[in-house]
Image (spheres, grey):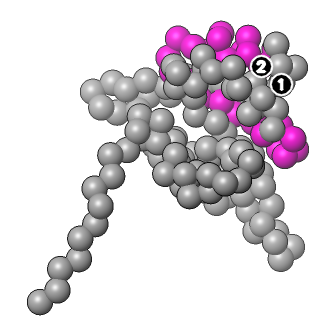
């Protein structure tokens, strides 16, 4: 008899929101969705490249075509000085950028975008009610 063991991974609040948003948007968009969790990002720590949290893409003309990207922010990441710079990197991809922020932080996200010269395609607020993700 053999035993297979797996490492128990505790998902961060950020990654939990990334996963839940990706699942919900997978039902709403006609494209493939890839996520970049904190765990996945850690595998590429030697890279200077920043990867969006959620990427919507499709397979066209023999290659993958990025359709849009989304960033999930937490209270802490919104306070980070590098947030506007990460969003600018995402805009450099030439696709729509959506941002998900904790409930009550929409104005803060819009202010960061304005100060960074960024036009967002949408800012969504998230919260949890009885353990279920709510988007507004």
Q: Is residue 17 something that shows in the picture? A: no
Q: Distance between the residues labelled 1 and 2?
A: 7 Å
Q: Residue furthest bottom?
A: 1
Dot 1: what SS? loop
x then y, percent, for residue 9: 33, 52
Q: How crowded is mark 2: few (under 14 residues within 10 Å), some or many (20 or more)?
A: some
- From what the image shows, is residue 11 above or below residue 5? above
- From what the image shows, is residue 12 above or below residue 115? below
Q: Residue furthest front?
A: 46
Residue in front for this viewpoint, 95 or 28: 95
- From what the image shows, is residue 83 above or below residue 60? above
Residue in front for this viewpoint, 14 or 64: 14
x then y, percent, for residue 115: 82, 13
Q: Does the magenta stretch include residue 98?
A: yes
Quadrant, the N terminus: bottom left
x then y, percent, for residue 25: 57, 45
- First in sequence: mark 1 vs mark 2: 2
Q: Is residue 47 something that shows in the picture? A: yes
x then y, percent, for residue 121: 76, 30
Residue in front for this viewpoint, 29 or 85: 85
- Magenta segment, which residues? 90-114
* 45 sits left or right of 10 in the view: right
| Residue pointed to by mark 2 | 113
Evaluate if marks 1 and 2 touch, with contact meaning CB atoms under 8 Å apart.
Answer: yes
- Choose mark 1 or mark 2, whichever is in front: 2
Kindly identify the residue that appears in the image at 69 percent across and 34 percent down.
98
| Residue pointed to by mark 1 | 119
Dot 2: what SS? helix
Kindly identify the residue that appears in the image at 58 percent across and 25 percent down.
77
């Amino acid at each position: 008899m053999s035993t297979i063991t797996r490492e128990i991974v505790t998902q961060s609040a950020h990654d939990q929101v990334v996963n839940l948003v990706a699942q919900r948007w997978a039902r709403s968009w006609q494209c493939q969705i890839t996520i970049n969790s904190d765990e996945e990002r850690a595998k590429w720590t030697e890279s200077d490249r920043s990867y969006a949290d959620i990427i919507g893409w499709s397979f066209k003309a023999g290659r993958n075509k990025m359709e849009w990207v989304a960033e999930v922010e937490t209270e802490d990441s919104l306070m980070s000085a590098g947030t506007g710079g990460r969003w600018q990197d995402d805009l450099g991809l030439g696709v729509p950028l959506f941002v998900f922020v904790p409930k009550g932080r929409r104005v803060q996200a819009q202010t960061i975008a304005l100060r960074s010269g960024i036009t967002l395609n949408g800012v969504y607020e998230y919260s949890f009610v009885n353990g279920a993700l709510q988007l507004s």
